[in-house]
Image: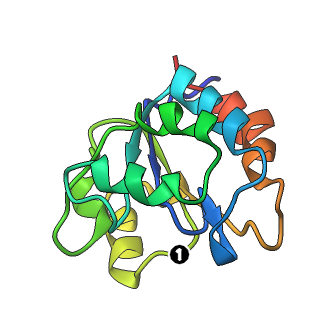
Amino acid sequence: MRILRENIYLDIDGVILTRGVVPAAHLGKFLKYVLRNYSVFWLTSKCLGEKKEIIRYLSQFLPPEIIPLLEQIKPTRFDLDKTEAIDFSKEFFWLDDELFDSEKNTLRNHNTFDSWIELDLIENPNQLIDLVNSKLKYFGGR
């Protein structure tokens, strides 16, 4: 049985950038894949309803050919917990390296804890491409 996920939510630190603001390995391939197959949203404290600041910030660290991909990612807005910006009426994946306990509890309350994909790009630098070739491909969007 194929479960369709419609949305992907992305953090920046630990997802797009690794420690020391180094671009994640396979970032271009990952972004092209998720943008082609999902509705992709920023879910980061660096985005408060507008993506202009994110693009400006990431432009300092990422190759120029990545920037047009980043511009396709939709902004979100939240006040305290990132979960405030998640559309729980749709299936989703949330890629983040760390969540607050309150965010984990919100996911549990919505029976969506398994939608969180915990990233550790230091332990597994190839995790983004591994996800494209496994979990995201199997469940893959449209």
Q: Residue at x 55, y 20 (%)?
A: 36
Q: Residues within 10 Å of mark 1 (few under 14, many from 20)?
A: some
Q: Residue at x 62, y 63 (%)?
A: 17
Of residues 27 and 93, the one drawn nearer to the viewer in this rendering: 27
Of residues 58 and 26, the one drawn nearer to the viewer in this rendering: 58
Q: Secondary structure at mark 1?
A: loop
Residue 71 against residue 104 in the figure, above or below: above
Classify residue 85 by image quadrant. Answer: bottom left
Residue 71 is situated, as x and y percent measured from the top left of the image, at: 41, 35
Left or right for 24, reference 109: right
The disc labelled 1 sits on which kind of residue? Glu
Residue 120 against residue 135 in the figure, above or below: below
Of residues 110 and 88, the one drawn nearer to the viewer in this rendering: 88
| View extreme (bottom): residue | 101
Left or right for 49, reference 60: left
Numbered label tally: 1
Whether residue 111 appears in this view of the structure is no
Residue 110 is situated, as x and y percent measured from the top left of the image, at: 32, 57
Q: Residue at x 71, y 30 (%)?
A: 138
Classify residue 32 by image quadrant. Answer: top right
| View extreme (left): residue | 79
Q: Quadrant of the N terminus?
A: top right
Classify residue 121 by image quadrant. Answer: bottom right
Residue 14 is situated, as x and y percent measured from the top left of the image, at: 61, 68
Left or right for 58, reference 79: right
Q: Residue at x 31, y 65 (%)?
A: 82
Whether residue 65 appears in this view of the structure is yes
Left or right for 109, reference 79: right
Residue on which disc 1 sits: 98
